[in-house]
Image (cartoon, rainbow, N blue to C red):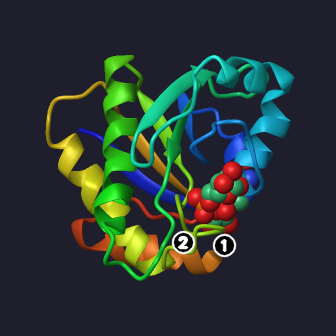
Amino acid sequence: MTELRALVGDITQLATDAIVNASNESLLGGGGVDGAIHRAAGPELLAFCRTLHGCATGAAKVSPGFRLAAKHVIHTVGPVWTGGHNGEPELLASCYRRSLELAADLGLRSIAFPCISTGVYRFPADAAAIIAVRTVRQFVTTATSLREVVFCCFSEQALGYYQRELAPLGDDTRSERSE
Ligand code: APR
């Protein structure tokens, strides 16, 4: 049984086996959560990411966590929102699915996601939350090592979208603040 839960906090502080980075196709850092993760992980992360030679939108690649509490960072590239008619929903779902597949391939037990694409890439946060929860729910129905999936929101508003999506099936939606 895999627990899905949502909280408001700084993903760089979470000690899940992996945290997911909302990166860009270069994998060479940026602002937002990407910048926060690189700052917290230290310069070794950028040096390692240079060896990955980029990542396509909707795909995911893994690196060590270096100075982070998390052992691994799964870098994924979300779609830029251009109105929803250029495959953005499917590409966003792919970010969650590929990240989960990589985590399961590594035998990880816990993973934390930021709200991928909902900042600079302007994907509507409410629609993104629905895609995120539904994609994760579908994945965890198959056998997997994952026992915990955390949706790490950065605002109470984003948390509200996840609470609405998680509540019906009784998943835990405590709005804990991470330390
Ligand atoms: N912890 C958790 N969530 C965070 C943090 C943090 N420390 N910092 C920002 N966020 C949230 C934002 O509030 C937003 O809800 O992460 C979500 C994703 O926003 P962005 O980081 O802007 O990512 P995205 O919209 O996917 O755009 C990716 O931005 O930073 C660049 O290099 C990145 O080019 C890429 C683009």
Q: Are marks 2 and 1 in contact (CB under 8 Å)?
A: yes
- Classify residue 152 as left or right of residue 170: right
The amino acid at mark 1 is Ser
Callout 2: SS: helix
Q: Where is residue 107 drawn, in percent x and y?
A: 36, 17
Indicate the position of residue 142 as horizontal and vertical percent values: 14, 36
Q: Quadrant of residue 25?
A: top right
- What is the number of the mark on residue 117? none
Relative placement, left or right, of 56 versus 134 is right
**Residue pictured at 67% horizontal, 47% vertical:** 11
Other residues around mark 2 within 10 Å, as few (<14) / some (14–19) / many (≥20): many
Which label sits on residue 155? 1
Check residue 159 in the rendering and tell me which mark sits there, or answer none. Answer: 2
Residue 16 falls left or right of residue 30? left
Residue drawn at point x = 45 percent, y = 41 percent: 56
Which residue is more in the foreground, 91 or 15?
91
The amino acid on which the numbered mark 2 sits, given as a three-letter code, is Leu
Asked where in the image residue 121 lies, by quadrant, the reply is: bottom right
* SS under mark 1: loop
Q: Position of residue 123 (x, y in %)?
A: 50, 73
Above or below, 20 relative to 31: above
Note whether ligand 1 is within 8 Å of mark 1.
Answer: yes
Could you tell me if residue 75 is visible in this image?
Answer: yes
Indicate whether 177 appears above or below 62.
below
